Image: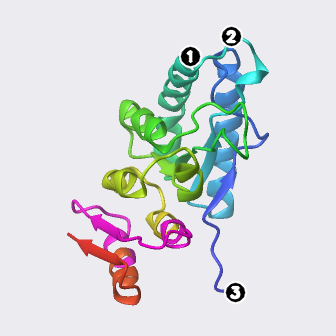
Amino acid sequence: NGMSLSCIVVTPRCGTADGSTLDFLVDAMTKSVAMARRVGARAVVAAGGPAFVSPDITPASAHASTVKLLKAIAPVAEAAGIQIWLENLNSRIDHKGFVLDTAKECLDIIEEVGSPAIRLLYDAYHSIVMDESPREILKRAHLIGYVGEAIRSALAQSLDDIEVVISDNASTAGTERICREFAASDPRVRYFR
């Protein structure tokens, strides 16, 4: 049919922020990784989650819990050939009370985990709502799970004067082809390898 499945969402839908549920989260993510592999998806999406689940969840504890969880699940994802895409959701408009609400923090967590199986699901809308610059976030494009979605998201913004500059440090997984296609079809995209 010519269609492919990019990703699935962790089931049951649960956030990564609550350290008291680590065993449950590892089990849910392990099952979701297995399902992703079974259906041919490239990734499993996980988000930080709402802080109001527990009064003990602070931004610092959410960060630490997410790092611990992702370090636990990374070997499972790596062995299955599946990526975990950590998604930031803005806490200003659409997801009040959410922690891990900036792409920057998610990227910091991904660097801390240090696994090629853990990447960012970048949505420029959520990032811009949190006053982040797509230009700054895309400087760390090598940590973004699906660069094509990141570029499309940046280009879809209602900004009058946007330029997407991609500096590719010899990334893999088809990034060069994807970026060259965007650069060839849209003058707002500049690509350097």
Residue 15, picture quadrant: top right
Amino acid on which the number 3 mark rests in the picture: Asn
Amino acid on which the number 1 mark rests in the picture: Ser
Q: Are marks 1 and 2 in contact (CB under 8 Å)?
A: yes
Q: Toward the viewer: 179 or 34? A: 179
Colouring method of the image: rainbow
Eyeballing the image, is 95 above or below 72?
Answer: below
Inspect the magenta stretch and tell me whether residue 21 lies in it: no
Q: Toward the viewer: 36 or 156? A: 156
Q: Toward the viewer: 5 or 179? A: 179
Give the residue displayed 36% in from the left and 71% down from the top.
163
Residue 61: mark: 1
- Residue 178 in the image: x percent, y percent? 39, 76
From the viewer's perspective, tell me whether residue 142 is left or right of residue 50: left
Give the residue displayed 46% in from the left and 35% down from the top.
105
Magenta segment boundaries in residue numbering: 152-178
Q: Toward the viewer: 46 or 185? A: 185
Q: Residues under labels 1 and 3: Cα distance?
A: 45 Å
From the viewer's perspective, tell me whether residue 151 is left or right of residue 11: left
- Residue 73 in the image: x percent, y percent? 54, 33
Eyeballing the image, is 40 above or below 3?
Answer: above
Mark 1 or 3, closer to the camera: 1
Residue that numbered label 2 is attached to: 56
- Residue 47 in the image: x percent, y percent? 63, 40
From the viewer's perspective, tell me whether residue 160 is left or right of residue 15: left
Residue 1: mark: 3
Amino acid on which the number 2 mark rests in the picture: Asp
From the viewer's perspective, tell me whether residue 24 is left or right of residue 141: right
Residue 11, picture quadrant: top right
Q: Quadrant of the C terminus?
A: bottom left
Q: Residue furthest front?
A: 160
